[in-house]
Amino acid sequence: MNKKEQRKLNAQIDKEVLKLTGGVYPVGLITQQKPIIHQKWAQEEILLNNSLIKRINAWVPEQERGKLFPGEKFNIEPEIVEFTENDIVVDENWDYEETKYLFQELRHFNYNFIILYDRYQYQNKNRDIYQLKDRYYSVMREILQKRNQTSHQLYNYVYDEEYDRFRNMELEKYLKRTKQICDDEKKIQEDLRKLDQLIKKQEKEHRSITRCIGSAQETDEIDENRLQTILEVGQKNEDLKNKTQQHIVYLRTKWVNEVLPIPSSVKDKLDRQLKDIIPQTKLVLNQELESQYSQLRKFYLEVLIKQRLQKKREADKKQLEDKIRKLKTQFDSQPQSDIKQKK
């Protein structure tokens, strides 16, 4: 390799690699011949259990000569069901001879209904594949039930011809879809996936808010922490509605009648007091009236909840006084000797 070729080859290499290696390292090709295994082959005549093809000649390895042909391992003899005219139901549509011909052709074509439908010829009768299936499965089920062969896999099988027609029709429509339809379905599936993620996210947020409120809708007890949480959530909604630069489209009546996360007993009292003051049916809301109504509802909510808290404290106080009274009565009823011994 001359200097010109060396420079041209080095120009294809990164400069940092060239500095580190000092150029292209020498490459030597080594060839190795694959060992040839001289295996002897022999031609063998193989007998088949086929009425059309009796035997074939095939090349087999010398050491496998005389062994079982691999294809024979998977050649399973089809089931042969013998029946008489008394064993089956015969009508004008299907007679005994045609039913017998159907079973013979099925055994001949290894129970492949598609091939049978293509080759079926019996006295110029036109049978579709669904009629052939229906006749075969109905006769098999009838024979097995008469012979009480409950272990057979077709004993309880009922072939539904209408469903099979509908299934193949839908399958054909699915296979004949255009590229535009496939792309639209992919887009719909992607939108459904995003919508499912959004629903899960909202459900998670809803569970988090419900946990923070303490499931106030399901209990009659409420404390100061829950009250503070309810008021903070309401204040955040008011701030979002009043201070945002974007216009929020909402119905004032829906906003006013929004269900609060409070116990049902407190909510009923709050609604009764507000209806006594301002009947909502006659209320024509504007921005000022809506703000005053929200403040009034907030005030009554605080009053009602504080009343409940006061009643709860009074009940706790009464319960403690009863315990003290019982202990005092128990102490006074004891003899003086027992008290001295305890001392």
Image (tube, grey):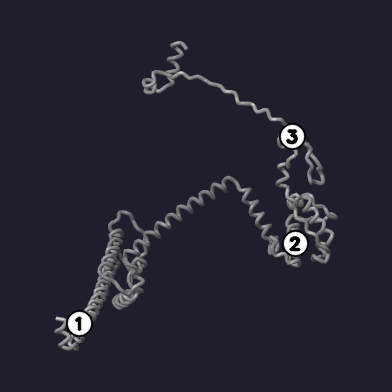
Quarter-wise, where is residue 92 in the image? bottom right
- Total marks shown come to 3
Label 2: few (<14), some or many (≥20) within 10 Å?
Answer: some
**Which x, y percent locates residue 207?**
37, 62
Report which residue position mark 2 lands on: 140
- Among the two numbered marks 3 and 1 on one chain, the one whose residue lies closer to the N terminus: 3
Q: Is residue 9 left or right of residue 315?
A: right
- Among the two numbered marks 1 and 2 on one chain, the one whose residue lies closer to the N terminus: 2
Report which residue position mark 1 lands on: 324
Q: Name the foreground residue: 294 vs 200.
A: 200
**Which x, y percent locates residue 212?**
32, 63
Could you tell me the amino acid type at mark 3? Trp
Could you tell me the amino acid type at mark 2? Met
Q: Secondary structure at mark 2?
A: helix
Quarter-wise, where is residue 338 in the image? bottom left
Mark 1 to mark 2 CA distance (whole Å): 87 Å
Q: Is residue 272 above or below residue 202?
A: below
Mark 3 to mark 2 CA distance (whole Å): 42 Å
